[in-house]
Image (cartoon, grey):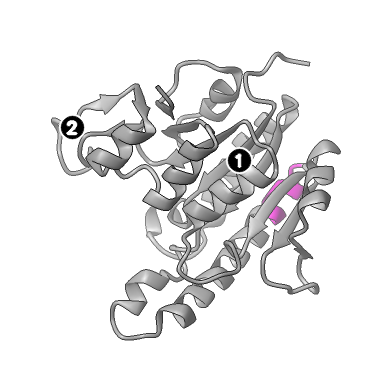
Amino acid sequence: MEKLRYGRVMLKLSGEALAGEQGFGIEPQTIQSICRELAEAASMGVQLSMVIGGGNIFRGISVSSKGMDRASADYMGMLATVMNALAVQDALEKLGITTRVMTAIDMKEVAEPYIRRRAIRHLEKGRVVICAAGTGIPYFTTDTAAALRAMELKCEAILKATRVNGVYDKDPEKHSDAVMFNRLTYLDVLQRRLKVMDSAAISLCMDNKLPIGVFNLFVPGNIQRVVRGEEVGTIVQGE
């Protein structure tokens, strides 16, 4: 088996990544492309868990700012993440990768309930575990859910897959002079208000010394490079 820097990881994938160029909904070709990369990583022997956002279908924070009750909007967002999880599960299993979708909200007809020990056992058996429905509690983002689940499942790192090459001092899609950081500390991210993950997720990772790797999902082979320990994107960790 190939030597890996990270034997068990949590991949945080935004819902928007599944929408492709259309910007909303689920684009099957984009999901197939992403899942081929995930399948390559899984075939290396890495134990892969995932949290997927739901912003391509429903964004609770945006809707609540327009008058909807925040808790109701967040629950709707959680349901959107389940739809994305099922789409990724379908694409992965067509590639021969065994998966389990586990939800924080009980919906046993479509997925297993999230039970920590059962999830760990799935990972040990080489199954990809897709954690859906966030934390099951409103007011927490899927970033925070990813950090929480990573801690519970004893992951060695969070891999934050994005559309850009790493963490920049400003939005590189809007500013051509944006500068990318190769390494940052958790305090750097919090003090500079860099858009890596929300502050609750960063604080949770800092308290538990869990590194965060931020990389471009759409560069072929990047996931494999990160788990091998190659210098890809930005790494956020302690001093």
Q: Main secondary structure of the magenta part?
A: helix
Work out whether residue 18 can be spotted: no
Percent of width and height locating residue 167: 32, 34
In the image, residue 5 above or below residue 123: above
Mark 1 lies on residue? 10
Report which quarter residue 105 is drawn in. bottom right
The foreground one among 114 and 228 is 114
> What SS does tag 2 mark?
loop
Position of 42 with respect to 199 (left or right) is right
Percent of width and height locating residue 212: 48, 33
Percent of width and height locating residue 164: 35, 36
Contact between labelled residues 2 and 1, with CB atoms less than 8 Å apart: no
Work out whether residue 114 can be spotted: yes
At 45% across and 68% down in the image, what residue appears?
Answer: 139
Checking the image for residue 178, the label placed there is: 2
At 60% across and 24% down in the image, what residue appears?
Answer: 227
Quadrant including the N terminus: top right
Position of 185 with respect to 141 (left or right) is left
> What SS does tag 1 mark?
strand
Report which quarter residue 194 is drawn in. top left
At 62% across and 19% down in the image, what residue appears?
Answer: 5
The foreground one among 39 and 140 is 140
* Magenta span of residues: 89-95
Mark 2: give few (<14), some (14-19) or many (20+) Cα within 10 Å.
some
Q: Is residue 170 magenta?
A: no
The residue type indicated by label 2 comes to Ala
- Kindly report which numbered mark, 1 or 2, lies closer to the viewer in this rendering: 1
At 51% across and 27% down in the image, what residue appears?
Answer: 222
Percent of width and height locating residue 6: 64, 24
The residue type indicated by label 1 comes to Met
